[in-house]
């Protein structure tokens, strides 16, 4: 069978030129934005755009033959998957295969996307509308991933998208209706050129009109001012429930906000080697591994090689049950001089789902807040970390005079000086963690790094040289670098803030010091990354091992990798003199947690508010720190008279408990103290030894189920609207529009009838409208003849009224009383006569039509 | 009935709604986009909201202006056309010389539309149960055309071989983005005749029979002497017995009378074709029309092929219930155009068959009826079976695999085949066809295509 073209070659070429090319240009621009936002894409936007272009061009030409989309696309998809599968199983080394498959996945995704868009725009009419509006909204969504936004970059992309969205509807519709020699169709070329020019003019006009608006926003962006508020940059972000989390991005902005709110309190049982003196460690929440040159901010990359970040959600783990991830230890690549350290974190403003602990954490266990501290702390967890003996918060804050600390510093420097052999590390690891973006500004940083530490042979010495560079003083004995929460921004918005900090301003906050240190170290070939979390300050010896973390302690610093010893914290930020002068007072630590003998996890199957008891459908339970699975699930009655009921956001009333809720109940009741359990015990037999009802002292509502139960109650409050509600809204909008359209003729008629009570003119208009709406038309030359026709057909008195109306309209004589009386009553009689001959069904059907209304008023 | 209702509702909405489906989708999506932006706005920090607000304002202005402009460029020509609907003339210009089912129609709109460049005009022809496809109107210009009018031309394709009594032209005015659509009905009474077309048919030699021609004879010239009107120069193959010797004697020129080129004693070919369909199982109006078109075109093609060869006599036709013998091409063409399937059996009886030379039998005549007819036929009458299944063509046996990857159902030459292939009555029709063929195979004079 001979293949037949659906479209001529010229039409396909025209589709490629007039639809494909503009689409690809837009995709290049959008992919550029996406690349800035997503670290994994590695700023290869041009190559990715080419993938899309290939897909799109291929689809336009391929489907110009009458190929069936579904089957051919399925084959394409299967082939792609087979290649992907083959790549995944190619023996190239685990990491190379991984990256190769990721790259192919990216290629396949973009190619297939281009293919889909190509076929959509060239073949499916309604797709154009979907695509046009989708692209515009998609552009806005992409922008949300890209902060802070450079206004010039944003506006250019915005105008381009707006232009494209309108242009594509016009040109694809036009092309769709053309056949044959499209490229030589002068009318098409002329109209398209004219439309493009007019549209460009329109966009330019809009650009001029709104120039000042964009400039204002741009200035606000540069200065960190928005809507008059000082909201330049925070190390933490505020969640909707009022809690705090570390920011997903580390911004280099004009100024930094600092608040004094207490975020959490922690106890850390880390001591200096061979001593009982506490050794504070920074609490890590996130790592920023990638730098976005466009927005000048540091980004999280969850796909970083050997990622040892442990990021559990404590709010999703039942009380006293633990979550362990040993891959974090393996990925830390640390085997020397490490020990297990534990910490207890009591949250105040820290988000329920957030987890912060010194690196490298691998275990988390939510614990109850002691009864006396329920009002102060919302939730708590215990964590275990694989911690280096050589790590400490004291890297910059050298405790001059403290002999023990000084000897500790010296000893660890000497140990770490021996760790310089990176030859056993994979090339991917080294390439990733020593990557510095290309560009003139980074060349300057490289040059500076070489000047600072070019002569140093060990990583440790390079670190110290960089630290000393930031601590050096000028000829006048004044510090060269200074800490400032308001360092300002360079005059040119697009100028590099890091080079401005390093070479001109020399003032900044932690993000500047960490960023500059990172690139200095990476330039020297030292694997490093930025960690974000909380600075640990040992303010008093009153409660050793207890640390208070305030919002202004949210911090960013550098971690340096030493072979065998793993990642070490390295903070080069100059101390903030102001903070040192006004330390926050520490409170009383939340001591007094009672020993827990029994913990039950399950869902509530029954609640009795009268005696405050709960029947728990038990799934898992713990007795004396040993956990068991209930097989099968059993119901146990809990006595909750003295129980403290809480959620992640604090204590709640017993009434908050609902049937079906997922809860964890814990008991410190002495009656359970003597129950013993061994791992070999039968779980359900063991449960029979527990007294019924079981007295519990703590009930924690687990977040996930809690949210599910209260979903409907909070639907209006959390601001999230689901797709179904969109559909319902659209449906109602359509219903309203249809109702309005169908009712409009009747409403207009009623208005005319109302006015007809006082005016003969409106009597005439009402009659005409009624006849027009009922499609009663005759080919008559004059109003008299027309009226006569109506009268003949319906038995009305329209001719008489017509004569009266002619007199009213053209004669200078006023209407007589009789004529007026006739005019006033004609409408009702007329309608009655008409209605006798036209059924109500026909009348209703005719009256819901809107088009005769246009007809009536147009004539 | 249900489909008809849906079809009518769709048509009603199309002509009553000021929006196209495309436009309706556009407005729904714009609403969704605005809502999603609102939702996104709630989740963003203030730096983004500041930009988003500016973007939203601009987008609102841009979309508003474009839509307003689009609406104006649609509503203005619509208003002008509505107001001057009496000044719109619809003229049938010509039938395409090569494709007879294509008709060119011209619209004259007065006054001249200034906004036409931005307005897309489409039209649809309505008449009886016929509703044409939407046809785009192209502006045409010619120096002879009035400068006060706008001229548009539209080409419509008629699907079936029959006449179409068009009474209304529905004009649709749309904007350059195809979002709005306003309609105006204009009375346009004219008749479009889609005549049968010549298709490829095999050469079949027919034997003329002496038809009833007693009332006809060669014309005799009543001209005055010396008048050479109705005379022609003698040529090869002209009958020397018809040479006008008196003229030769006077002028020395050999001439013959033109009416006498044909022999007044020659026998004619009388063709009979029946549109009787005892076959009510096609279940598809599309297929009914298809069979009819195939049958009409086949008859016409046979007629033309015999007319070209028949030099002495002429080809006459008895088209179905038209008992009058049709002799001119025009008459036969029109008779074929008006013919349609009916349930009345073959009407010729007994001796009436004697003058018939050739009978064309369609696949829709039940085999029993053909048998009955054959019993009445005198010897020498040829029966030609027009096998509809062969005229449609079967789909290639290996079509199913390509169909997986090719939209064969949308390829014009495959469309009919798909209809045919998927029809439930196909098997019964083919069986009837085979039975007729079997019956005819016993006749010496049968010719099967």
Image (tube, coloured by chain):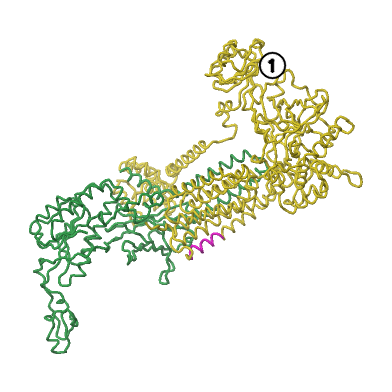
Chain colours: A yellow, B green
Crowd class of label 1 (few under 14; some 14 to 19; many from 20; radius 10 Å): few
- Does residue A505 appear left or right of residue A167 in this picture? right
> Which of these two is toward me, A108 or B253?
A108
- Does residue B379 appear left or right of residue A705 in this picture? left
- Does residue B206 appear left or right of residue B131 in this picture? left
Using the image, determine if residue A60 lies above or below residue A694.
Answer: below
- Does residue A747 appear left or right of residue A55 in this picture? left
Using the image, determine if residue B265 lies above or below residue A638.
Answer: below
Q: Position of residue B327 (x, y in %)?
A: 17, 66
> Which of these two is toward me, A781 or A396?
A396
The magenta span reads A186-196
Using the image, determine if residue B393 lies above or below residue A310.
Answer: below
Question: Which secondary structure, mark 1?
Answer: loop
What residue sits right under mark 1 in the picture?
A: A595
Q: Residue furthest right?
A: A476
Q: Residue at x 40, y 43 (%)?
A: A848
Q: Chain of mark 1?
A: A
Q: Is residue A479 visible?
A: yes
Q: What secondary structure is the magenta-colored segment mainly?
A: helix
Q: Is residue A852 visible?
A: no
> Which of these two is toward me, A290 or B3?
A290
Q: Position of residue A620 (x, y in %)?
A: 58, 20
Q: Residue at x 14, y 66 (%)?
A: B207
Q: Position of residue B62 (x, y in %)?
A: 57, 51
């Amino acid at each position: 069978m001979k293949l037949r073209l659906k479209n001529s070659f010229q039409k396909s070429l025209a589709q490629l030129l007039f639809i494909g090319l503009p689409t690809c240009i837009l995709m290049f621009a959008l992919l550029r934005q996406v690349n800035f936002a997503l670290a994994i894409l590695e700023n290869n936007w041009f190559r990715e755009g080419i993938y899309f272009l290939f897909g799109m061009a291929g689809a336009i030409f391929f489907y110009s033959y009458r190929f069936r989309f579904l089957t051919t696309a399925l084959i394409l998809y299967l082939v792609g998957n087979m290649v992907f599968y083959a790549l995944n199983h190619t023996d190239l080394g685990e990491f190379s295969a991984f990256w190769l498959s990721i790259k192919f996945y990216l290629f396949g995704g973009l190619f297939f996307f281009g293919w889909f868009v190509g076929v959509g725009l060239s073949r499916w009419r309604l797709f154009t509308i979907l695509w046009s509006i989708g692209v515009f909204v998609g552009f806005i969504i992409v922008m949300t991933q890209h902060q802070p936004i450079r206004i010039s970059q944003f506006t250019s992309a915005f105008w381009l998208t707006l232009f494209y969205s309108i242009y594509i509807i016009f040109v694809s519709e036009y092309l769709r209706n053309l056949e044959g020699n499209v490229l030589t169709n002068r009318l098409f070329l002329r109209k398209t050129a004219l439309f493009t020019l007019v549209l460009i003019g329109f966009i330019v006009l809009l650009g001029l009109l709104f120039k000042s608006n964009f400039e204002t926003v741009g200035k606000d962006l540069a200065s960190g001012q928005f809507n008059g508020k000082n909201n330049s940059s925070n190390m933490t972000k505020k969640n909707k429930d009022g809690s705090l989390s570390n920011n997903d991005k580390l911004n280099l902005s004009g100024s930094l906000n600092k608040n004094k709110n207490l975020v959490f309190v922690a106890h850390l049982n880390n001591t200096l080697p061979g001593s009982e003196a506490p050794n504070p460690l920074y609490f890590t929440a996130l790592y920023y591994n990638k730098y976005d040159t466009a927005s000048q901010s540091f980004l999280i990359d969850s796909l970083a090689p050997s990622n040892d970040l442990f990021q559990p959600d404590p709010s999703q783990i039942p009380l006293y049950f633990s979550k362990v991830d040993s891959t974090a230890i393996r990925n830390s690549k640390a085997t020397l001089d490490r020990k297990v350290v534990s910490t207890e974190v009591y949250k105040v403003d820290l988000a329920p789902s957030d987890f912060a602990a010194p690196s490298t954490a691998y275990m988390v266990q939510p614990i109850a807040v002691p009864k006396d501290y329920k009002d102060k702390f919302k939730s708590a967890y215990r964590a275990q970390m694989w911690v280096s003996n050589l790590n400490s918060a004291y890297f910059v804050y050298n405790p001059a005079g403290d002999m023990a600390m000084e000897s500790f510093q010296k000893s660890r420097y000497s140990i770490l000086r021996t760790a310089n052999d990176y030859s056993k590390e994979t090339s991917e690891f080294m390439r990733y963690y020593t990557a510095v973006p290309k560009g003139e500004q980074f060349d300057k940083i490289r040059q500076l790094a070489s000047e600072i530490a070019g002569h140093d042979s060990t990583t440790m010495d390079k670190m110290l040289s960089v630290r000393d560079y930031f601590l050096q003083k000028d000829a006048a004995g004044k510090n060269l670098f200074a800490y400032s929460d308001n360092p300002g921004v360079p005059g040119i918005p697009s100028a590099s803030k890091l080079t401005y900090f390093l070479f001109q301003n020399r003032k900044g906050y932690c993000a500047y010091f960490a960023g500059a240190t990172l690139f200095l170290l990476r330039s020297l070939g030292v694997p490093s990354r930025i960690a974000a979390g909380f600075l640990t300050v040992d303010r008093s010896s009153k409660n050793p091992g207890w640390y208070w973390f305030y919002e202004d302690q949210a911090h960013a610093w550098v971690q340096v990798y030493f072979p065998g010893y793993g990642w070490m914290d390295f903070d080069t930020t100059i101390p903030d003199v102001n903070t040192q002068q006004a330390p926050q007072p520490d409170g009383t630590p939340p001591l007094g947690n009672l020993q827990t003998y029994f913990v039950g996890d399950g869902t509530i199957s029954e609640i009795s508010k009268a005696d405050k008891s709960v029947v728990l459908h038990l799934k898992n339970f713990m007795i004396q720190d040993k956990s068991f699975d209930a097989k099968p699930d059993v119901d146990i009655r809990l006595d909750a008279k003295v129980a403290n009921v809480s959620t992640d956001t604090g204590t709640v009333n017993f009434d908050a408990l609902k049937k079906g809720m997922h809860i964890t109940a814990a008991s410190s009741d002495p009656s359970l103290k003597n129950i013993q359990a061994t791992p070999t015990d039968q779980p359900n037999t063991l449960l029979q030894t527990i007294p019924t009802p079981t007295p519990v002292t703590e009930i924690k509502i687990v977040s996930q189920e809690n949210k599910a139960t209260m979903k409907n109650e909070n639907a209006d409050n959390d601001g999230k609207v689901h797709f179904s509600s969109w559909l319902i809204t659209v449906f109602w909008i359509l219903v309203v529009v249809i109702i309005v359209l169908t009712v409009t003729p009747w409403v207009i008629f009623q208005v005319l009838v109302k006015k007809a009570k006082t005016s003969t003119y409106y009597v005439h208009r009402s009659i005409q409208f009624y006849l027009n709406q009922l499609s009663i038309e005759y080919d008559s030359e004059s109003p008299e003849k027309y009226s006569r026709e109506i009268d003949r057909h319906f038995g009305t008195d329209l001719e008489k009224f017509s004569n009266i109306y002619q007199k009213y309209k053209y004669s200078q004589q006023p209407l007589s009383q009789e004529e007026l009386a006739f005019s006033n009553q004609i409408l009702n009689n007329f309608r009655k006569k008409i209605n006798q001959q036209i059924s109500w069904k026909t009348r209703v059907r005719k009256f819901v039509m809107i088009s005769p209304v246009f007809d009536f008023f147009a004539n | 009935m249900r489909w008809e209702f849906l079809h009518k509702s769709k048509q009603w909405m199309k002509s009553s709604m000021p929006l196209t489906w495309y436009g309706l989708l556009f407005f729904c999506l714009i609403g969704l986009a605005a809502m999603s932006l609102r939702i996104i706005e709630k989740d963003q920090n203030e730096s983004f909201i500041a930009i988003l607000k500016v973007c939203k304002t601009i987008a609102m202005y841009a979309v508003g202006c474009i839509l307003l402009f689009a609406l104006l460029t649609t509503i203005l020509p619509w208003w002008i056309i509505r107001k001057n609907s009496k000044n719109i003339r619809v003229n049938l210009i010509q039938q395409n010389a090569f494709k007879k089912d294509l008709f060119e129609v011209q619209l004259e709109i007065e006054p001249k539309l200034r906004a036409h460049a931005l307005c897309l005009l489409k039209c649809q022809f309505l008449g009886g149960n016929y509703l044409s496809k939407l046809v785009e109107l192209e502006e045409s210009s010619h120096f002879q055309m009035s400068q006060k009018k706008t001229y548009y031309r539209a080409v419509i394709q008629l699907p079936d071989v029959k006449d179409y009594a068009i009474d209304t032209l529905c004009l649709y005015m749309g904007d350059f983005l195809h979002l709005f659509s306003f309609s105006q009905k204009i009375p346009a009474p004219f008749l479009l005749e889609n005549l049968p077309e010549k298709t490829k048919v095999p050469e079949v030699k027919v034997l003329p029979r002496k038809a009833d021609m007693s009332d006809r004879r060669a014309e005799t010239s009543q001209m005055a002497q010396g008048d050479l009107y109705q005379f022609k120069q003698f040529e090869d193959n002209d009958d020397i017995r018809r040479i006008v010797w008196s003229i030769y004697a006077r002028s020395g020129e050999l001439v013959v009378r033109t009416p006498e080129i044909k022999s007044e004693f020659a026998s004619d070919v009388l063709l009979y074709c029946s549109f009787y369909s005892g076959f009510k199982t096609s279940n598809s109006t599309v297929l009914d029309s298809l069979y009819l078109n195939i049958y009409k075109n086949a008859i016409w093609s046979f007629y033309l092929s015999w007319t070209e060869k028949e030099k002495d006599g002429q080809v006459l036709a008895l088209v179905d219930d038209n008992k009058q013998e049709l002799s001119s091409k025009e008459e036969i063409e029109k008779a074929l155009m008006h013919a349609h399937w009916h349930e009345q059996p073959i009407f010729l009886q007994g001796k009436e068959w004697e003058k018939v030379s050739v009978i064309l039998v369609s696949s829709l005549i039940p085999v029993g009826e053909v048998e009955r007819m054959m019993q009445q036929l005198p010897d020498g009458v040829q029966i030609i079976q027009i096998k509809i299944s062969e005229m449609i063509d079967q789909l290639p046996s290996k079509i199913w695999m390509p169909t997986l990857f090719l939209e064969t159902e949308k390829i014009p030459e495959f469309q009919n085949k798909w209809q045919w292939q998927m029809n439930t009555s196909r098997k019964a029709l083919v069986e009837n066809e085979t039975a007729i063929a079997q019956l005819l195979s016993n006749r010496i004079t049968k010719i099967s295509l």
